[in-house]
Amino acid sequence: IVMKGYLKNKTAVLELNLQINTQNQQYKFSKSSLYIEGMPFLISGSYNAKETALVNLNIRGNNIQIDQAFSVFPIDVLAVLETYNARGVLEFDAAVIGELSNEKTPFFSANFAIQNGAIKEVDTGTELTSIFLTGDYSGKNKKEKEKLNLSNFEALLAGEKCKGNFEITNFNAPNFLGSFKAVFALEALSNFISLDFGELSGKAKTNLSFNVKKNLSSSQYLVSALDGDLD
């Protein structure tokens, strides 16, 4: 049930504690376990197959490693993380709710938190450390747009602190909305985002809010709003 539409080409093992009501064609899960690529999750909820197939599941993961965790997210835009190595622990609580059929996929949402994480750019070795954040993801259906929120984000780059809040919507042509405050060592920033700006030195202080959208038909970005200070 859980794998349909969300987990493609992933190894998953489901250990069920199942209560079955044959008259109502209802199945209840309690104290069950789901292992996705070896990651352990607790699963509970119900599946009703009497008329329309309806699923209502809660999936909770504790002490999940960051470098494995995003395999459970149906978010193509996170492919950018392939250029980075990540470490740290992720707390994860998700829900899968709605109709399950060949035409429809249940609504997926998740809350998560990272404490003391780190992300290293593979080629340069430049590292974003001491990452703390909370976030939530909601999939798209007829009433909701696909959305990823990263709130209360804090981290260190080359010993300098950065913090902010970010929202990503419309993942086919992503829209980035948020605010960001940081002091950057320019050379470290260039190395971390894998862009060659030539030889850089010194630091930049930023306090910005932004609204940026990617053009669906090209690699260009449209800046709808950019406010704040850059020194």
Image (cartoon, rainbow, N blue to C red):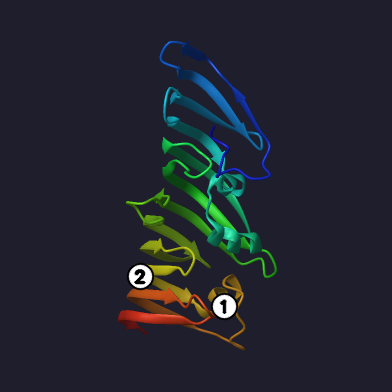
Residue denoted by label 1: 190
Q: Badge 1, how many Cα within 10 Å: few under 14, some, many 20+?
A: some
Type of amino acid under label 1: Ser
Q: Is 225 drawn above or below residue 36 in the view shown?
A: below
- Front one among 217 and 199: 217
In this image, 62 relative to 136: left or right?
A: right
Residue beneath disc 2: 181
Q: Quadrant location of residue 231?
A: bottom left
Look at the picture and state if 40 lies above or below 228.
above
Amino acid at dot 2: Lys
**Quarter holding residue 23:** top left
Counting other residues with Cα less than 10 Å from the Cα at mark 2, is it few (<14), some (14-19), or many (20 or more)?
some
What SS does tag 1 mark? helix
Q: Earlier in the sequence, mark 2 or mark 1?
A: 2
Return the mark for residue 222.
Answer: none
Percent across and percent down for residue 179 are 33, 68
Q: CA distance from mark 2 to mark 1?
A: 17 Å
Q: Residue at horizontal 61%, vertical 61%?
A: 120
Residue depicted at 40% across the width and 69% down the height? 176
> In the image as oriented, which residue stretches furthest toward the left?
228
**In this figure, what is the number of numbered marks?**
2
| Image quadrant in which the N terminus is located | top right
